Amino acid sequence: DGQHVHWHGHGCRRHLRKHLNEQIERENTMSDYIAPVKDMRFVMDEIVGLDAIAALPGYEEATPDMADAILEEAAKFASGVLAPLNWIGDTQGCKLGPDGVVTADGWKEAYKAFCDAGWNGLASPTAYGGQGLPEAIGIAVKEMASSANLSFSLGPLLTGGAVAALLTCASDELKAIY
């Protein structure tokens, strides 16, 4: 009847695999990630208490307007830069070359743009080049990056872990180096 696929022989399997891979590629070449900015702001305001955090010394700049601006820009970056690289990263992967690890096309440039925009140091201390914002804002941006492109987000996640280790355990001399 034309609707049944017979699994006999390698030719049919090869044809089906090719057809499925083409369909998956068509479906995954465009990003459809849209960050839930309104939900994130609700959580910050109603559950986390961003206004109370902004009243703490050092967090005075964490105003609702600042949080809105950061979340809106992070959402644009996540959907416009990170999400489109998700499929590329999955299909190309990373490779170990003679000069070190080579990431998928576009990842190096995306990571540079991520760092240049300050997303990597959003909640890090200003004394070490960060923006000194509350982790409540930083975690929302991390969530966007993870949701848009989980594989990519592991790089900044590891950097954040290294920063936390240095801040917690390193001497002042070592902190100054890194």
Image (cartoon, rainbow, N blue to C red):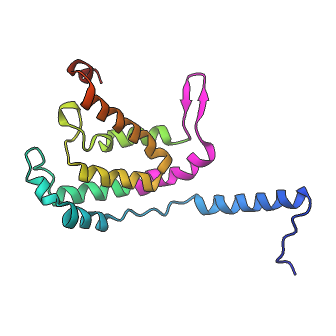
Q: Residue at x 71, y 58 (%)?
A: 21
Q: Position of residue 40 (x, y in %)?
A: 29, 63
Dividing the picture into quadrants, the one containing residue 109 is top left
Q: Is residue 33 magenta?
A: no
Along the line of sight, the residue nearer the viewer: 27 or 144? 144
Where does the C terminus fall, quadrant-wise? top left
Q: Residue at x 89, y 56 (%)?
A: 10
Q: Residue furthest right?
A: 9
Q: Residue at x 25, y 31 (%)?
A: 168
Q: Position of residue 174 (x, y in %)?
A: 27, 20
Q: Residue furthest front?
A: 169
Q: Where does the magenta region start and end? A: 78-104
Q: Residue at x 29, y 42 (%)?
A: 118
Q: Position of residue 93 (x, y in %)?
A: 59, 41
Q: Is residue 103 magenta?
A: yes
Along the line of sight, the residue nearer the viewer: 99 or 165? 165
